[in-house]
Image (cartoon, rainbow, N blue to C red):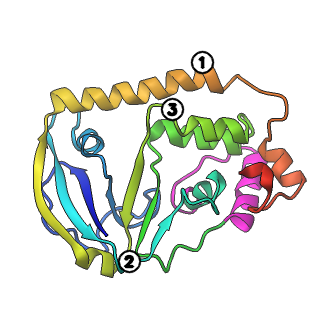
Amino acid sequence: MLRKLYHGSRDIIKKPVYGYGKKYNDYGLGFYCTEDINMAKEWAATSNQNGYANCYELDCSDLKILNLNAEQFCILHWLTILLQNREFDTPSGLAYEAKTYLLENFKVDYSAYDAIIGYRADDSYFSFAQDFINGTISYRQLNNAMHLGKLGQQFVLKSRKAFSLIKFTGYELAEHTEWFDKKNKRDKSARREYFSTERNKRQRGDIYITQIMDEEMKSDDARLR
């Protein structure tokens, strides 16, 4: 299966380098792409500098891909990968306990995979995840929040094998006067919807992190599907 992928950057990257980059990204060290070229352009442009949507093709036929959207996973599996790689603010005892519980019960071993497909945690969405482990929002609200602003998915190359198979096919310019503004509008839209629709909209039967821990819910619990 051939996938078309895009990577937003201030540079033209003809050959992604295995082992290069920031290890504190959502899924750790890797090459972060998207199947949406417009999303890549938003990632590429800064407030005062143009960027590039680098274009690639990747033959996935022989790759082992972890798809966090598959039915055997829930949003808490995605969250535990974030907890392993990103710096979470855990000022309260509840947040620390929640982080420990999730890592013990929902941790995904992704070390053997060539690539990962899942949500990307831009600033707004990262704050939604923090609200959940701090007990501010419910499991349902966290799920809903991840769809605000049309967040989209990211495709992350993790292994040497995946890096060896990706082929550069060109690039498109991302002008900062257009794409940085679009990125800001998407982020603001997500935050506005979150605070007006989700953050203060508790429903009867909502499950919070305290209940998940108290009832020792595991990944096979039907209430988390």
| Dot label at residue 148 | 3
Instruction: Report the residue that reaches farthest toward the top.
Output: 196
For disc 1, the neighbor class at 10 Å (few under 14, some 14 to 19, many from 20) is few
The residue to which callout 1 is attached is 196
Q: Amino acid under label 3?
A: Leu
In this view, the mark in front (2 or 3): 2
User: In the image, 111: left or right of 95?
Assistant: left
Q: Is residue 219 magenta?
A: no
User: In the image, 145: left or right of 112?
Assistant: right
Q: Secondary structure at mark 3?
A: loop
The image position of residue 189, as x and y in percent, is 44, 24
Residues 50 and 197: in front is: 197
Q: Amino acid under label 1?
A: Ser
Q: Amino acid under label 2?
A: Leu
Q: Is residue 90 magenta?
A: yes
Q: Secondary structure at mark 1?
A: helix
Residue at image point 17% right, 69% down: 167
The residue to which callout 2 is attached is 63
The image position of residue 72, as x and y in percent, is 64, 63
